[in-house]
Image: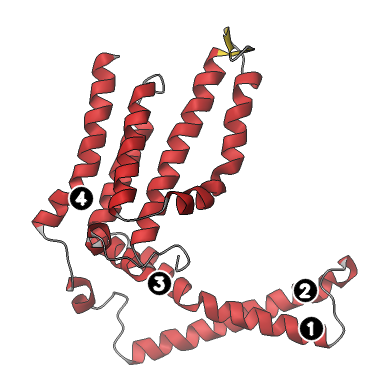
Amino acid sequence: MKGLYLDRDTPLHRLPPEVKIAAMVSATVIVVVTPREALWAFAGYAVLVAAVAAIGRVPAGWLARRSLVELPFVLLAFALPFLAAGDKVTFLGLEVSRDGLYGGFNILAKGTLGVLLSLILAATTTTRDLIVGLDRLRCPQIITQIATFMLRYLAVLGGEARRMRIARISRGDDPRFLWQLRGFATGVGALFLRAFERGERVYLAMVARGYAGRMPAAWLATGAATRNQWLAAATVPVAAAAIAGTAVILG
């Protein structure tokens, strides 16, 4: 997440994390429940997403590069019109399935919009703020605490794994060869044990300093959202709901 965050000074960056998370989830749900036949509605969603990205100064090229994560679903969407059964129609000179055509568009449009909304959230909110926002939204404590420790010590474990790999190579081990897979598996097991022991020591140290399984109340209270900020963030899901409602009414 650190690599996704773009350090900017924009109205979107300054919004508290809980309102951005709630707005993103609400808008995504509205996009998902929109009928797939309402083609113009998805064009409206795209304009809305572009406007939000412009407010947050998130470059289009940055979004395009990182949205490649959905490439497998894009391939499925393009293949579905040729693989699905049902009535056939001619599209761009090719005979394809009507249901497959709508299904492929459904996957492509909704998946792309969901990925873009998630990327905008990640680009305008730090990892720490995302966890704080989830906690303010009453996300189960076990989830936020696990995420906190995972993100905090992921880099530490990555450094430990690199040191172990260098130590193996310096002793003549080359993990590229299949017959040395046993040594690699042993290293993974050793890394797990070190991570477990480190986690236990960190937890005991935190308990000794008063940790009771929750984030400090003062930390969560700092920068909590005001009513005006909730209203400002609500403009995105409200606009999306207006587009979806119009699509349903017009059929």
Instruction: Residue at 24% x, 33% y: name it.
Output: 241
Label 1 Cα neighbours within 10 Å, binned few <14 / some 14-19 / many ≥20: some
Q: Which residue is mark 3?
A: 148
Label 4 Cα neighbours within 10 Å, binned few <14 / some 14-19 / many ≥20: many
Tag of residue 233: 4
Q: Which residue is mark 1?
A: 168
**At label 3, which amino acid type do we have?**
Thr
Q: Position of residue 99 (x, y in %)?
A: 53, 16
Q: Position of residue 250 (x, y in %)?
A: 26, 15
C-alpha gap between disc 4 and disc 2: 48 Å
Local secondary structure at mark 2: helix
- Residue 155 visible from this viewpoint: yes
Tag of residue 184: 2
**At label 1, which amino acid type do we have?**
Arg
Q: Nearer the viewer, mark 4 or mark 2?
A: 4
C-alpha gap between disc 1 and disc 2: 9 Å
Contact (CB < 8 A) between labels 1 and 3? no
